[in-house]
Image: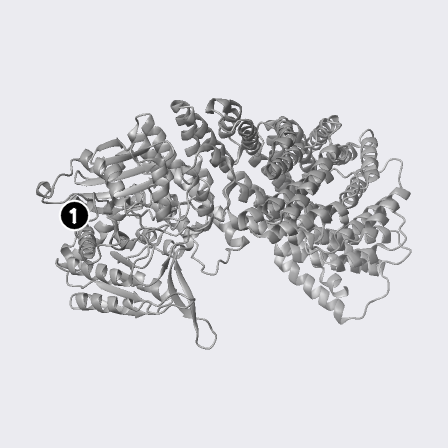
Amino acid sequence: MASYKKKNINLNDFDDSGLICFLERLNQSQHDHPAPPADAGQAALFEMIATHVAKRRLARNDEIGHKLNDHEITLRRRAVDLTPPSHSTLIMRRLVAADVLLERFEKRDRTIEDLKLAFEVIGPDNGALVDYLLVFGRIQRCRFIENLDQSALDTAIEVLRQYSISCPPSELVQLYGNLLITRYRNTAIPKDLEEGIKQAEDASKGGSEDNKIFALSNLAEFLPFMFELKNGAERALLEKAVESAQMANSLAIKNKMEDIDFVYGALAHAFYHRYLQSRDPDHLKQALENGNEAVRRCKTGELSRATWLNNLGLAYLAKFRQKVNITSLDKASESFRLAVQESRLGSQTHFLSLNNLADAHGLRFEWTGETEALDIAVSKYRELVNIPNTNELRRAEALQNLGNILLHAYRRHHKLENLDEAISSLRQSLEKYPTGHKDVPVVNSFLCRTLVIRGKESIHEDRMKQDISSAIECGEEARKSAAQDDSQRHVILNNLSLAYFFKWKSERNKYNRETLKKAISYSEQTLEATHQDAPDRASHLGYHGNLLSAEIWDNDAEAESSSFSDPLKCYKEAVYLPNGLPLMRINAGRLALRILADQKNWEEASEIGLATMELIPLACGKYLSLQDQQQMVFQTSGLAAEMCSLMLELGKPDESLERLEAGRAIILGLSMNDSDELSALESTNKNLATEFKDIKARLRAPHDPHGRRLGEERLQEKWNAEAELTRCLEKIRKIDGYKDFLRQPSKDRMKSLSEKQIVVLVISTYLRSDAIIIRGLEIKSVPLPMMELDKLKDYGSQLTSNFPIADLPAKRAMEVISMSIPIQTRQTSQGFLNWLWVKCVQPILSEIGIGGSQNGMPRILPRIWWIGSGAAANFPFHAAAASECDSHQDTMSLVISSYTPSLKTLLHAMRRSKQSQIRRIDYQKENPSLGIITMKTTPGGYGDLPATEKEREVVMNLTESKWNCTSISQPTADVALQAIRDSDIVHFACHGIADSRDPLESHLVLEKPSGINNEMEVDKLTVSQILSIDELQKPWIAFLSACTTTSMGGLRLLDEGLHMSGALQVAGFPHTVGSLWSVEDSVSVSIAQAFYKNLLRLEYASIDDRAVAAAVREAVIDTRRLHPTPWANWAAYVHSGA
């Protein structure tokens, strides 16, 4: 220090970086010399330098500011060490040094060393009582936050209570209140809450205005907790909380008080709780505005910031529930995520924020069906349950939430262990909650519902009865113990109703009708207790309608549709609830549509149906994973066909076509690339097109054959990109001519086919059977009254394995249908082709003007694209014939047939075909590449396919002189995928599996090393892998000489076209050749030989779409001559695409 004096250095001469260099040299000189004895003069110098440094660092919040802060602490500790024990400044220097150490802990590093140093610096005895209490209390509070040391919190409260002052300063008022509320949140001891409120009320009545601001803010935070403690019995508490916060805010602004994030935080907190009770949108608006202001005014790293972020997230969550805007849910998740990051692990704020983040992920799953959001929610609740040193109340809450979310997990994954874990978690939660706690009723209610679900799944009658009995016991306990205005009362009553309903269904006899009446009574009370804007009201209404319907059928199994006016009223209300879950509204809409159709009230049925159809995009988002999209479509399948029939009943073929196209092949449509519309946009607005492509690239997730998830960070990036894409689309659709950018094709686009291109849609539902014919600009309908529903079912069951809900009567449709549907053996009825000809195909061809004897056959056969829907979805229209022996009165003699999953898919294939033809013309000298993939033997118990070798030889012999042929034997899925990318034509000769329960997992059966003794195991090339392929450059024809490659295998998703043939079309192949069912090996060889032979008659560059389809037709005709019976052999192969 002597050298410092001699040089007479002026600290103002240094900039901040220079000052740091000077301080580092000063610090080093202190280390180099032994510590001097107490020296009041040197102590004063160090204090002076520290004060100068403090002013500098307060002006900045960056790395240099942090370094200045560290040096300030060193200087102040040095000043304390040099101050003589009896010196009058020692007390204050100790307090200031401790205060700066606490500030670093609270706002920056939060290292326990700072707390230890602060405690050492302050000293055991301090003459400045108030300042000592402030620093001591802050130290103990920080110790609790750091390591959940409850004794530190208890000690601080007792010390401050023991040394209470008649008129304490404002800072002490705030600290004492914070200590009490911190302990209350951790232990839920009511006396802390009561004392905190009384102390804040007393302090708010006198003293300085600063004192009042702190006291009123504390009061605003305390009172909502008292409202909850009293189970909502004293609503005036919330009014008083808002008034207190507003008074604090007015005083703070009037006095130009700085660092008032706590005032805005208290105001937001009070308004949020007021909104929960009032449902007044203005209260929520105030909560959001003030919550954002509290976060804005609070620097990153400050202890209170995590609290304000968590509270802000709750307000955004409430806004989401109010308006169902996914943006609000995203903002809530982001607020919770930041709160988790900025709070200390194990702290109450960390626990609450993590809990709320899990809740936000669970809500996202409910609304979007995004399974990964559900799985993340489950993992976070499990994390909460396993946090060490958690008090019993928190653990009880975590177990409660885990049990509830596991019920959702069971519904998605169908794993019984989820149910067992849920029941165990809920029972543990009940054990840990104190008697009379406000959440005990709802935990009992969740347990009731979970036991009901497990009982329904049980195959043992005794176990089922035991679960249902326990469920009713828990449900009744929940009902009796819940307060009349409990916010969860509607949940409690609904779950109890469900338990009685299942008890009635399991016993179902005339002596237990009182059980059903109980279920209905509790359901009625549920609706009375449910807010009009509550998201689950739609679900409650749909369920209540089902109960009323069940009662009507129980009283009269032959009840007329006019008896269902009360259930209809419930379903109609549910459809139009804007805050209802989309799937719940769709389910209600379908049931309302059935009743109205039975009543022949076509106009109202069409209104309900149209409103229901508009919900499909909300339920099945474009950027969900393929598996999640499939889950959603499982629950909406068949609705489009019903609506089409309804519109035809009203004589509106154009609208019927629009409805059908909007609701079928949804997943294929969402998977198509949009390069054509993007190319047009690039010529209009290149910047927007580039922005759109960049966002799309971020959204595209590569297919993971092992089913691994994206992970929370990548998933959050995806959600952010979805929000950006929505905003980008809004900008694009404001440009002239781009109003319908990437929307469903309009009627004009559907009519864009030429006069020679005919599309025929055959729709068969419980309402009626019809064909819609599209020819050029004309759309006409042809009623097919002779296609009887019973026959449709009989023949359909011979071709597929089960029936969709769309083709069942209204009463059966109401029942819960198990996913485990027994597979029926396919048969080949001798009369089927004649029935299909007489009842369906011949009337259609006659309407078009095609028919007559062989002499009257047209010289150039017309082309027809067939689209089957509803019960007719898997029918082989190309094979229909008056007789199996007559080759003149049949489809193949009169037209060239092709198939397509939807008009959108057909238009896509035609665009890709044009691109392919341009490429072939541009590269006439370049021979096409053909990849032939064969599997002579297949692991996993599949039969050998010896004919694949012959098929390979036949195809190679026909093509290798003109095309570049590559034979690929026994490949892995990755090798096969590469062949698809590299080839103009790809030919598969292997086993194919159509998975009716999970069509995305329908696959071609290949092989890969098992890793054990050079053995091979099955490797699957799935539909989902094909749909995940990036845009292909060369595709032209995909020939699938494998079983069921153009079949769904079952009727649950028949209208989706989720098979290998449809997937390859979406991936870019304009033409696919595949089989509707399995055939004999020799037939596959014949078809392949005839197809390539017919195709090679033309020059490569001149082969157009018609030629490819004609080659398939001629191959089938040739095979029919060789293998006339059974007809299923030759009729299996079809052309799909352009």
Please tell me how crowded label 1 is: few (under 14), some (14-19), or many (20+) other residues with Cα within 10 Å. Answer: some
User: For numbered disc 1, what is the local secondary structure?
Assistant: loop
Residue 327 percent across, percent down from the top left? 51, 39
Q: Between residues 807 and 1127, which one lies in front from this camera angle?
A: 1127
Q: Quadrant of residue 113?
A: bottom right
Query: Which residue is denoted by mark 1 in the rendering?
Result: 887
In the displayed structure image, the side of residue 120 where residue 945 appears, left or right = left
Quadrant of the image for the N terminus? bottom right
In the displayed structure image, the side of residue 798 where residue 925 appears, left or right = left
Name the residue rendered at 31%, 61% in the picture. 981
Say how many tags the image has: 1
Residue 873 percent across, percent down from the top left? 33, 43
Q: Quadrant of residue 335?
A: top right
Name the residue rendered at 22%, 35% in the picture. 843
Q: Is residue 296 in sight in this rendering?
A: yes
- Residue 205, compared with residue 741, is above or below; it is above
- Residue 184, compared with residue 654, is above or below; it is below
Q: Amino acid at mark 1?
A: Ser
Colouring rule applied to residues: one colour
- Residue 646, compared with residue 411, is above or below; it is above
- Residue 822, compared with residue 245, is above or below; it is below
Instruction: Residue at the far bottom: name it.
Output: 1013
Residue 412 percent across, percent down from the top left? 53, 48
Residue 72 percent across, percent down from the top left? 72, 56
In the displayed structure image, the side of residue 194 where residue 1104 appears, left or right = left
Q: Between residues 748 and 1078, which one lies in front from this camera angle?
A: 1078
Q: Is residue 59 in sight in this rendering?
A: no
In the displayed structure image, the side of residue 558 where residue 510 appears, left or right = right
Q: Between residues 807 and 7, which one lies in front from this camera angle?
A: 807
Q: Quadrant of residue 312?
A: top right
